[in-house]
Image (tube, helix red, strand yellow):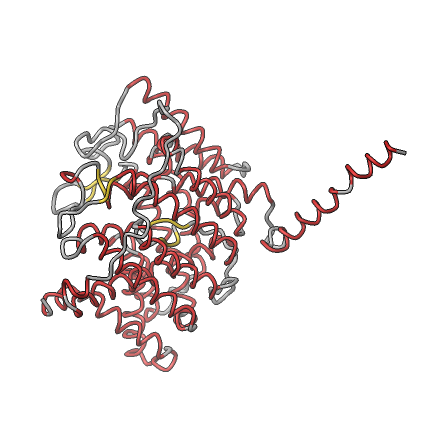
Amino acid sequence: MSNTKTTSEAASPQPAARGLKARLDAYFEVTSRGSSWSREFRGGVVTFVTMAYIVILNPLILGGFSAGQAAVDVEGGWLPNEQVAAVTALTAGVMTILFGVIARLPYGFAAGLGINSFLAVSVVGQVTWAEAMGLVVINGLIIVLLASTGLRELIFNAIPRQLKIAITVGIGLFIAFIGLVDSGFVRASGANSPPVQLGDAGSVATLPTAVFVVGLIIIGVLLARKVKAALLIGIVATTVIAVILEAIFKVGPSLGTNPAGWNLNAPVLPTSVVALPDLGLIGQVSFGAFERIGMLAAVMLVFTLVFTNFFDAMGTMTGLASEAGLADQDGKFPRLKSALIVEGIGAVAGGATSASSNTVFIESGAGIGEGARTGAANVITGILFLAAMFFTPLTQIVPLEVAAAALVIVGALMVSQIRHLDFTEFSSTLPIFLTIIVMPLTYSIANGIGAGFISWVLVRSFSGKGREISPLLWVVAVGFVLYFVRGPVEALIG
């Protein structure tokens, strides 16, 4: 009797476990989206691997190891590297999980590279770091308000389908270009013409770039042969090759002085694994910028942040939804409003922690390419980011050149959406082309969207198709005109 009872008691939790798994499956829509838990896990890991560089790069942009090599604000203040690294990982982890649980989409979050560079180069020369982060918080609150009232979704719906597809293709080229530049395969020539060139002095002459090429071929062959976990296997295999080559040839990081070195971090096994995070930057926010530089100047800075944040994220979400097969024929995807609201919260959280505005990362396409289709992958990515706070040395093993190979592959997958574009009518061909080409050439998703919007409303209107254009698209186009001429406007208001 007792043995029977024990067996029964041991077996009783199993239906509950199956029930929990079924509820999680239904909540994240894993099965209904044609995915599986193993694919979500692999996708989450790949997204983290391709995004992990932000834990290293963001501190180099926003902070430094000393005041002599950091971005110093108007009062001489600067952000310590290790503190920025800690809050970068923390905010990315929390926001990625939050987005996955609420929006249930496989889009990783982290500090946006466009905005953090803008803060370090253009903003802190006028205000303190705390005041700059206060502007980021205000930017996020405005975006949350626009999303909550439905205005952001209305703008999204007003974008013609052809432009939405063009945004996806443009982002694909942008991702590929980022990968080619990060790998050193494409470099600035230092001349007026051509402005860029192949590798070093026109040839692939460095070991890190050669590793990128090897990784590109490995991942490409695995995908062509339809091998499961192709991206993850390729990244791991190429990283192992990179570690071995670095141990033999000791190339070292470039550090801005060694053009033959690894672009960001050398692939070496760390001497220490665990590092306790310093979260002292959390809450270091001030709203004194309006008093310091005046209302008009501060408003122009917020305007720039909002436009960059707003349309970069919208374009990225559109491209990723198309790549994941989650968008309908009009480019809409599940829980659009929730996604837009949470993205705004990412900006608020990034400002509040001094990590800079957190937004959707285009590198999430790597996880989608690995099979991620739901927010369950985000939970994995977020947990790995939280772990990175304590295991920061481990995030430096995968060199940027290896992640770059995955980005070029993802870019190629996204560019394939070009087959859905209609080039038979030039009134739409020109805006489509400008949307696609301006993104990589100006290194900005928002610039490409702006060029597409402005040319769409003007060319289509003067071609007799003005009635087809949403009035809201006209309003946004005018906003982009102001965005593009904000430099002269800021100069006029001093």
Rendered view: 304 above or below 9: below
Kindly give the residue lying farthest to the top in the view shown.
248
- 404 and 26: which one is in front? 26
Q: Is residue 240 left or right of residue 74?
A: right
Residue 133 horizontal/vertical position (percent): 26, 55
View extreme (right): residue: 1
Q: Position of residue 304 (x, y in %)?
A: 24, 63
Residue at image position (22%, 57%) is: 131
Q: Eyeballing the image, is 455 above or below 191?
A: below
Q: Position of residue 78 (x, y in %)?
A: 19, 45
Residue shown at the point (50%, 62%) measured from the top left? 333
Instruction: Point out residue 335 in the picture as x, y percentages from the top left corner.
Output: 51, 63
| Quarter of the image with the C terminus in it | bottom left
384 versus 27 height, above or below: above
Q: Residue at x 35, y 58 (%)?
A: 348
Q: Is residue 168 visible?
A: yes
Splitting the image into 4 quarters, where does residue 154 fall?
A: bottom left
Nearer to us in this view, 160 or 239: 239
